[in-house]
Image (cartoon, rainbow, N blue to C red):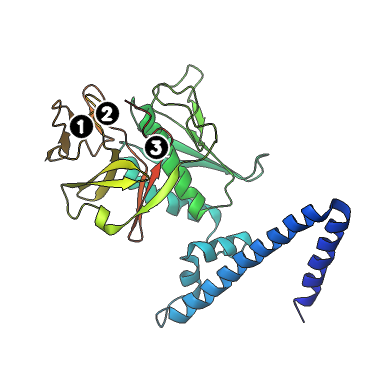
Amino acid sequence: MAGAEPGARIGELLDRLGREAGPQARETADELVRSVVEFYGEGLARAVRLLRTAPAGSDPLAVLTADELVGDLLILHDLHPEDTMTRVGRALDKVRPYLGSHAGDVEVAGLDVEAPEGPTLRLRLRGSCDGCPSSTQTVRWTIEETVARLAPEIAHIEVEGVAEAPAAGGQPLLQILPHPPADVPGVPPPAADGEPPRWHTLATPALPARDHATRVADVEGNALLLVRLPGNLYAYRDRCPGCGADLRTAPLDGEFLSCAGCAARFDVRHAGRGEQAHLEPLPLLEEEGAVRVALPELLGAGP
């Protein structure tokens, strides 16, 4: 049988590991093999299910690549019909509506597949997050999440161009990280456990039902203010940065939210900017009918 030889080889290697490294290492290796088999088994089952239920006349490859798990398997074995840069371009197209809320845009500056740390994507961020460190972080996290989903072979992302003025030597260079660097002013350092921002899918009932409407959603005990404007959905921490009051009853006047406690006004479409302070924006992505929002460590760290 075609699969007998590789299967026998795996068994031989596991036995050898058990003899040379001991029973505990053998148990760990067995668990690893089971996990890999389950991963591929789920991918194969999903591929069969997708092809069986696809509408007549559908492109089989398009059906398979639209699924994240199956698409990742195709990428892993260099079988995906789209090359890396095509998928990176699609990822950036997905985040551009979010970047627009920060008056920003992003373009590809280059891809170094020979970088020591692995394939490194260089991006150039333009006009983003003027004077707002936490907005800069949410933009970077959103880019990282989206690129990782569509181009998982990218090991490292670097971004040129940030809100702060360039240094005398030229454009500053920031790496996209799971957390903001500890020395960014106004942004608390990451937690000691080093966990990245947690992305959550929001159920439809938690979302504003129409344009110029707001709704508060509870995610892991955190109150998130969701605001729907024509063309986009926005997520902010449900707290006024001026007086600390919640914003769930704040009236929405066009694209401006007014705090009922201190009357401060915030520009919802442009990262929650206000005259004295700004709302705390959260990374949000709308794709294929689903809404996903991230909870970085900075959420809840302010007053």
Q: CA distance from mark 1 to mark 3?
A: 18 Å
Helix, strand or loop at disc 1?
A: strand
Q: Which residue is mark 1?
A: 266
Q: Amino acid at mark 2?
A: His
Q: Is residue 224 visible?
A: yes
* Mark 3 closeness class: few <14, some 14–19, many ≥20 residues within 10 Å: many
Q: Amino acid at mark 3?
A: Thr
Q: Nearer the viewer, residue 96 or 135?
A: 135
Q: Is residue 154 depicted above or below 241 in this figure? A: below
> Could you tell me which quadrant the N terminus lies in?
bottom right
Q: Which residue is mark 2?
A: 278
Helix, strand or loop at disc 3?
A: helix
Q: Who's the residue at 55% across and 52% down the image?
A: 152
Identify the disc placed on residue 138. 3
Tell whether 226 sits left or right of 5: left
* Mark 1 closeness class: few <14, some 14–19, many ≥20 residues within 10 Å: many
Whether tag 2 and tag 1 are in contact, CB under 8 A, the answer is: yes
Q: Earlier in the sequence, mark 1 or mark 3?
A: 3
Q: Is residue 93 visible?
A: no
